[in-house]
Amino acid sequence: MTSLLRTAVAACLLWACANSASAVTVLGSNFDGNMSLVYDVTNGNVFIENAPLANPAIERLVIQSLSGQFLPGNLSVPVLVPPVTINSNTASLIDIGWNPNGNFLGTGSLLGGILPASLTVANLLADLTIQWAPASSPLQLGDLIHSGINGSTQGNPIVVAPSPNGFFRFFNVASGNFFDPPMATGYEYTMESNSLFTSVGLPYGLGNNFSIESSEGTVSGLAEGGYHQFSSGVSTFKILGINPAVDASAPDAFPVFLTFDTETASFNMLPIPEPGTVVLMSLGLGALLIRRRARPVANRAVAG
């Protein structure tokens, strides 16, 4: 998809776009600076992912399905005063209109099961056209995140087994994904390839007061769902302040969104547990890997 084509489609009038002959959706990723619709392949739920946009408020959302796949009865929007205007809710076109109060949609906003479950990436990209607008701005193109792709969402991160020395090594993985070893109170990330870390996106539900330490200094007080951009890229950094930490009775995970200055990279993650938690981590790892396979996509407000 060329930038010229995307610009031309985004600039056209709504009803002309609705009657266009072909879809223009492309795959997106969390924290990519564009509004994304996240599709949950297990149940057809669709929710919003739009951070770290400078203006994350979505005041209009227009989605077209060329083949009429939408399930209008499942559409769910926030109850506001004055209410949100639904200009269209059909099998072919969902148009959620301007809200005078603004901020009616944001990261984590659930639209409901507006699509059938188990649709493929190819099906959705060929069928959907996604448009959105912040404030009173013109409509622009959004993109799609498919939860069935490993690393695409917090609920479906890329997972690796531990090495004998306690590291978790991710080899030749793509930039712009979620990566997830077992829980600890902190992690140290170290590049093994000739690459640099360029940004970090933090998950939800595992603390709200993170710190990131690197050669560029320490950034403290980062909230859940926060996003940190390194000014020039770093080869190693730490994330501290994860809470809750290791719990042998209910092990959980810490999926982190990472980008690199290269398309792919290899890096290690070293858990930094609290004193006395190393044994608990090893005991909980087997249960964690089993549990993670069945873990649903989080209804979250992670920024992308």
Image (cartoon, rainbow, N blue to C red):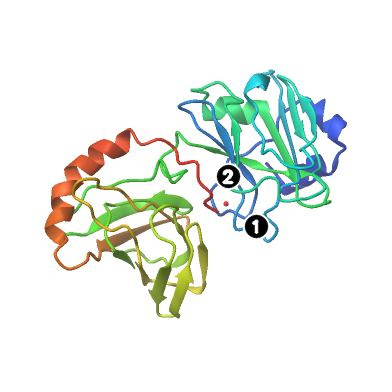
Choose between 171 and 223: the one closer to the eye.
Answer: 223
Residue drawn at x 41%, y 71% is 211
Going from N to C along the chain, the mark reached first, 1 or 2, is 2
Quadrant in the picture for the N terminus: top right
Residue 116 picture location, percent across and down: 55, 21
In this image, 14 relative to 234: left or right?
A: right
Side of 149 relative to 66 (left or right): left
Is residue 88 found left or right of 47 in the rendered image? right
Q: Is residue 22 above or below residue 301?
A: above
Q: Amino acid at mark 1?
A: Leu
Percent position (x, y) of residue 22?
Answer: 73, 27
Q: CA distance from mark 1 to mark 2?
A: 14 Å
**Residue at x 67% of width, y 29% of height:** 128
Query: Residue 292 or 32: which is nearer the viewer?
Result: 292
Residue at the spot x=74%, y=43% of the render? 132
Q: Which mark is residue 28?
A: 2
Residue 209 rendering spot, x and y as whole percentages: 43, 67
Q: Residue 106: percent from the left, percent from the top?
A: 64, 48
Three-letter amino acid code of the residue under disc 2: Gly
Q: Residues within 10 Å of mark 2 (few under 14, many from 20)?
A: many
Residue 53, disc = 1
Quarter of the image where one finds residue 276 = bottom left
Q: Secondary structure at mark 1?
A: loop
